[in-house]
Image: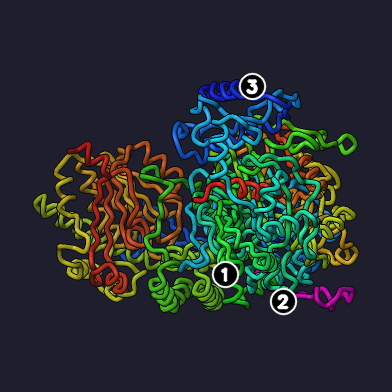
Amino acid sequence: MALSSGADRGSHSMDKSITLPPDEIFRNLENAKRFAIDIGGSLTKLAYYSTVQHKVAKVRSFDHSAKETEGDPLYEISVQEEITARLHFIKFENAYIETCLDFIKDHLVNTETKVIKATGGGAHKFKDLIEKKLKLKVDKEDEMTCLIKGCNFVLKNIPHEAFVYAKHADSEFRFQNTHPDIFPYLLINIGSGVSIVKVEAEDKFERIGGSSIGGGTFWGLGALLTKTKRFDELLQLASKGQHTNVDMLVKDIYGGAYGSLGLTGDLIASSFGKSATTDKEFSKEDMAKSLLHMISNDIGQLACLYAKLHNLTRVYFGGFFIRGHPVTMHTITYSINFFTKGEVQALFLRHEGYLGAIGAFLKGAEEDNPNQYSWGENYAGSSGLMSVSPELNPVQRARSGTFDMLEMDRLERQLVNLPLLQDPTSYIPDTVDLTEDVLAREYWLYCFEEALDGVVKRAIASQKDQPKAVERAEKFRQKYRHKLQTLRHQPFAYGSLTVRSLLDTREHCLNEFNFPDPYSKIKQKENDMALKYYLKVVKSVEELSWEQRQFTLVKGLLAGNVFDWGAKAVSDVLESDPEFGFEQAKLQLQERPWLVDAYNQWIERLKGPPHKCALFFVDNSGIDIILGVFPFIRELLIRGTEVVLASNSGPALNDVTNSELQILTERIAAMDPVIHTALKEDRLALVQNGSSSPCLDLSRLDKVLATVVRERGTDLVIIEGMGRAIHTNYYAMLSCESLKLAVIKNSWLAERLGGKIFSVVFKYEVPSNIREIKS
Amino acid sequence: MSEWMNRTEKLIGSLRVQLTGEAHSLSVYRFLVNDIMELNGFHCDGEGCAEEKEEEPPALMLPRSKTETPCSLIATPGADSEAAGGSALREQRVSKSTPVMLRLDSLKKNRPPFPWFGMDIGGTLVKLVYFEPKDITAEEEQEEVESLKSIRRYLTSHTAYGKTGIRDVHLELSDLILWGRKGNLHFIRFPTHELPAFLLMGRDKHFSSLHTTLCATGGGAFKYEDDFRTMANLQLLKLDELDCLIKGVMYIYSVVSSGPPECYYFEHPTDPERCEQKAYNLEDPYPLLLVNIGSGVSILAVYSKDNYKRVTGTSLGGGTFLGLCCLLTGCSTFEEALAMATEGESTCVDKLVRDIYGGDYERFGLPGWAVASSFGNMICKEKRDSVSKEDLARATLVTITNNIGSITRMCALNENIERVVFVGNFLRVNTLSMKLLSYALDYWSKGQLKALFLRHEGYFGAVGALLELPNPS
């Protein structure tokens, strides 16, 4: 649908007539409420809260009183509508305000909304227009308060929000891990002037200083000097200029460096100093560059002086002067580095432009307590960070003329750190940063693109009788392929690119087109079949000697993990007889010694006293969970170790979800007195991990899980599967014993790790402090 | 310290005893002592002086009253020579006693030959100080070579040299005693780009035939060293500019006693009606933040005569003011730019807090008159078209000055220093900036910080260089 404000009413100029693709922007307006708007000098940011209705797969156990008949499935799957909360943020140029307001008016059904929170310098100017168009009362909020609120929100809720910019590095962006405690920090907001704000707590902040030399100075003085009107054009000029033609450098005065003071010859001694002493014409580019350096250096210097005085090391930069521009980020970074001798790093934010809108929104939504929830960036609905290299990608740059979006989902569970992380501040979930590792990036992007057809097929197959499944699956394909293409050019779009983020993006895109659980039926079938062999497997294990039994259990765990629909290499085996498959899988496994082999240490440990409580992050459904994990934890339970099984809150690939696991556990308990008793005595507990990802971020886990872990005195963590133990957490350091095991089902990765396909990783780690106590 | 005090007292005592004849002004007296210490501290070549190096310059410890002290010029520590150390005194002109005569000889031997110059070659200006001896005897006059005479006559009989060289006559220090000679200290400046012409003149006046050392500091001492040698056959004694700066400041402050005060400040800087220039007593100067505003800016924290550090600097300095003014208004000299700035109004160029908030931004204690964005109004075409050159010059001056004030204030806070002395040629005839700095420091520090200024604002580096003349290292 095209929307044009010009042609219909004939009262507006043509340049305001734009086409809004309503499928893509201002989504879910029907249910929108709580609007907030931040109108800056050139960009408008609109925020609203909406509820999204989407399909979720639910499993429900059949009534046990009914007589079981052969061939009936284990449990029932139903697709239900669920309503979840989502925050929408849209950024567009001020020129489109009127068109956008008209569009919103036409699509806004909800009549409850009475006010719109507004902030930003332009809010005043557009007050009447907003009130007239939307019939909402404009309620102005303090700019700085909004900014800080927004900043706290993104720092807390978006992993990889902050980054360090390094122009000449392989990857321009170095994303920072979310610190559990974000305070205190310094925010340098560079608008027309500069504000320096010290933030000590959620609602405690102080403007400790500022400067009048800011973005307005660059723009105003730049316009006078170069006769260039637009801010972005000035930056373009600057990126092409040579400041050394205009500035007086140390070497212009000294002929070289000022060695005794450690001032190098290339240092600027006097900005614009050459224009004071030479009667020549200076190029626009050179003057713009000199001006940019002058202003960036000055701001950087003041920021350092304030950081030093207040003893702060985390310094974030934002405001329209920065706005993701590589030249300004580079000059600011350079300046901070120079003045603090590398002690303070300049940090930038991916969603810096949205801070005011987010803050204004939060001010208006205080009664909903948005801060008590955890939120997650929706990769499907968010534009991501644009390419910031104007020289490399002028087309992408021009996107500032269109619409940029950020969508955040309210997560059902509040997320916290795993209490067993050795050092939460230095924990990085992902093993390989694909933003830095070019070869790995190319491989995985290729791999995900290759697998796309299969995913589309499976999505359609999962909803054979559903309306428009093919059409939706096709839309999914386009969206995900587009995301992959974007990531190929801008690997940093959503923070560090990782296998996890690629997998998560795929899950978000599938959800977007109402494919909540493409594997539900496969999982059902596999679970059903595997259950039939459970007792047989348990019995055969029981007959073995202790030593043999331990090895068989571990092999079973590993063999079970071979069954993974996520890996193409094994899908064929799966179609055949599962029992045969299970035995086949054991044969496929690499012989010992494994690629990483700490089995002997593990066995030695088992000869010692039992663990108090084991936390097991489970992986796939079917054979993996039923024939691999259950016999293994059964042995632990018999040894006297409590077991907590942590499974996904929502579906991802063929991973077993918490609700599925509950049904499976019940069924196993009905067959196996060991499991039955353990459940009854609460020595076996099931918890959800708060995630819907095939990977595992131990810094964002369900709060309940953290409590259970703490209460039960967990002293062993077992992480299973490629997604959770290889792509993520391979290097995670825990404060208790841990077992990380996986079968490498990808030849490229296996080769990279120095092995072959079906290589085994069996990593048993004991933190040094515990080792010392024991010895 | 106390040991030194004792020695000084002894010395003064011995002077009182020995000196007879005409009364002499305290300034000479002070300089005399200063000079002793100068020798003690820097170029003693003998006994009992090494441990003196840490001492403060005596000038700064003596009362600055104008009380005449009854003593004549013959100065010698007498038998108690360890007090002064080595070849201490050079102040012996009127001496008739034998030991003094001996000392005179030794002084004569060590005294650098004329001409006495100190040079500071900066990014924009060359600052030259020249000591013109006024006590030349007939005998000397005869011996004086023609080239020396010619230089002396040329420099002292003009107040302008070529189109751009200027002698700041109002700064001249007359009847100064330096290394036993009485004379006038002249302050001359010319643009750095005229340095080749200066060198050619030096060559034409056979400067090199005088076998003198030319003490030079500033970046140009390094950059143009080869040119001095090849064009004028002159060997430079290169000196660190910050060392010279501090030495120069302390020296000039100590020798100026009459006339306008060397150090001054603006009283009531926040009240234009009552704002006035007042003398400031800088006897006990440390710790001190010394802000040198030349083409660029250096900020030094000075803890004692020999203990200082460069805290930071900024490239937004006098060169930036002039450079931007040239580009924005088409002017070509500092004087022109400053004259325009005096006429202009910056509030139409800058965006003020009140332009954004309609008044004060109370939430953060920002007054409406404060500049929110320098040149912030210039993003708008209509305002660009209606603004005058004078307004632009004024806004440039205010921007640069306020920024220096702001960085200085932060350094003062970080270094925990309350006294700030601003020097450098940016402040020459620039009362506007001085008042602005005074105001800014006073207002934003709530009266905690004081901005001080020195009359010889831009010449301290050159003076410091001159003082190194007897140290041919």
Q: Residue B369: name its quadrant.
A: top right
- Residue A674 image label: none
Residue under numbered circle 1: B230
Vertical relation: A196 (above or below) A744: above
- Secondary structure beneath dot 1 equals helix
Give residue A667's position: percent from left, percent from top.
31, 53
* B89 displayed left or right of A89: left
Give residue B178's position: percent from left, percent from top.
65, 41
* Gap between marks 2 and 1 measured at Cα: 79 Å
Residue under numbered circle 2: A1
The reply to whether the magenta stretch includes residue A294 is no
Is residue A85 visible to us here?
Answer: no
* Gap between marks 3 and 1 measured at Cα: 51 Å
Which amino acid type corresponds to the residue marked 3 in the rendered image? Arg
- Residue B16 image label: 3
Vertical relation: A677 (above or below) A542: above
Q: Callout 2 environment at 10 Å: few (<14), some (14 to 19), or many (20+)?
A: few
- Secondary structure beneath dot 2 equals loop
Q: Chain of mark 2?
A: A
Labels 3 and 1 touching (C-beta < 8 A): no
**Foreground tag (2 vs 1):** 1
| Part of the protein shown in magenta | A2-27
Q: Nearer the viewer, residue A37 or B239?
A: B239
The reply to whether the magenta stretch includes residue A25 is yes
Is residue A595 visible to us here?
Answer: yes
Which amino acid type corresponds to the residue marked 2 in the rendered image? Met
Q: Main secondary structure of the magenta part?
A: loop
